[in-house]
Image (spheres, rainbow, N blue to C red):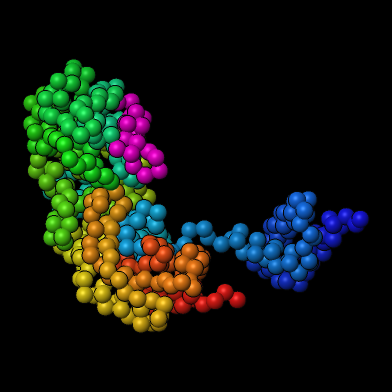
Amino acid sequence: MANPHRGLPSIDRLIGDERIRALTPDYPVRAITDLAREELDAARRAITAGDPCPPFDAIVSSLLERVAATVAPTIRPVINATGIIIHTNLGRAPLSDDAVAATEAIDRGYSNLELDLDSGERGSRHVHLEELLRRVTGAEAGIAVNNNAAAVLLALSALAAGKEVIISRGQLVEIGGGFRIPEIMAQSSARLVEVGATNRTYVSDYEAAISESTAVLLRVHTSNFRVVGFTETVPLTDLARLAHQRELLLLDDLGSGCLLDTTRFGLAKEPTIQESLAAGADLILFSGDKLLGGPQAGVIVGRSDLVAVLKRHPLARATRLDKAAVAALAATLRHYVKDDPTATVPVWRMIAMPFPAIAARAGRWARALGPTARVVDGRSMVGGGSLPEESLPTKLLAIGGPTLDVEAIARRLRLGEPAVIARIEHDALLLDPRTVDPREDRALIAALRAALSPPS
């Protein structure tokens, strides 16, 4: 019996094929040769496992795909039609046009990131954000690092290393990716002291736990879940009063970074940064890419003397923002200074989107697709560890039917160009106009038509 491995071409024959040689103006010969070896190795393994030797043309085609996949970006834009406004898996908050423009302008060349243009001397990257943070929040000072977990780590490392930090058991939350607040706190060398019960904690619990080693009372807003029923939490004003009576610091990890009154939009009350400052928190920590609507960042605002300590700590450099994030965050904050976030910041524009406008777009989508599509009632979720379980009424495009494989259609949408992410419920593919930029409507319809076409 003939050895099937002998049907495989040599490296020289494979890379000498005119279809492969056509790649050499764009790719080094050495890189193509390495990929050709990988392709032949994969074919050998398949033959050993019992597959027949592939035809030469099939090997060439597979090698061309391998070369293309090697240089293709793995991160690329997607159209979010899920109805989840702050979608963690899809990059959380999309940036405003101004923030995108600011990022592009700074990334294209040099900038005065750490140069004082007036004196010509070295400056600080913090100056580009601090005045904006003061104006937007009303705090004395502010600093931004690369995410909110880093903000917690920096604050506790600088202010409570080797000391005790008291926190309610009901606030020992797990954030994305399996990371837990106690684990982050442990990296700061602060000692965690848990008080109260999961569902009920009183100010007396904090008071009884304070010792000579206590440095901080920490409140963590449970922004990604809600405990209901037989519950009791301590108002922030009471924690502030206790902390300051005992000469301790009160840190408030708000997480979502909310600056607007969410009840204006038919949502549950979300604590704001301004309210936390008014209640007496010494430092407030929050994310830049949740309800703030900016880039990934961890922001700390509050007392100027404490922020000055944070700026001098070595972790401030290890966790600092790069120039693009500084530019994007500054542009986002300027929207709040100008009082126009519901018109300019995508997260708030989506939250504030009028229901009739959503219904009209869903209807246009359905008419463009024909009888396989219909418009149904639904709910949009805020998502992203903000306003847990809160949703807004919406209209959805629903695609389904006895002859349609909605799982297959959803996969074709994800793998298409552009990639479209939808959701499946009750054997129907659902797409929510609230989270789709109106400028993406035409591309979305084209992608849906392609995904609904019978595969060739």
Q: Quadrant of the N terminus?
A: bottom right
Left or right: where 1 falls relative to 172 = right
Q: In this view, which residue lies farthest toward the front?
A: 402
The answer to which of 53 and 123 lies nearer the viewer is: 53
- Is 183 covered by the magenta stretch? yes
At x 42% / y 71%, what residue is drawn?
A: 400
- Is 179 covered by the magenta stretch? yes
Work out whether residue 447 can be spotted. Answer: no
Left or right: where 339 falls relative to 34 = left
Q: In this view, which residue lies farthest toward the right?
A: 1
Residue 266, image x, y percentages: 15, 60
At x 48% / y 64%, what residue is drawn?
A: 407
Q: How many marks?
A: 0
At x 65% / y 64%, what residue is drawn?
A: 65
User: Residue 184 occupies which quadrant of the picture?
Assistant: top left
The magenta-colored residue range is 173-190
Left or right: where 22 falls relative to 255 = right
At x 65% / y 61%, what residue is drawn?
A: 66
Q: Quadrant of the C terminus?
A: bottom right
The answer to which of 287 and 378 lies nearer the viewer is: 378
Residue 14, image x, y percentages: 78, 64
Residue 334, image x, y percentages: 21, 60
Work out whether residue 276 can be spotted. Answer: yes
Residue 37, compared with residue 442, is above or below; it is above
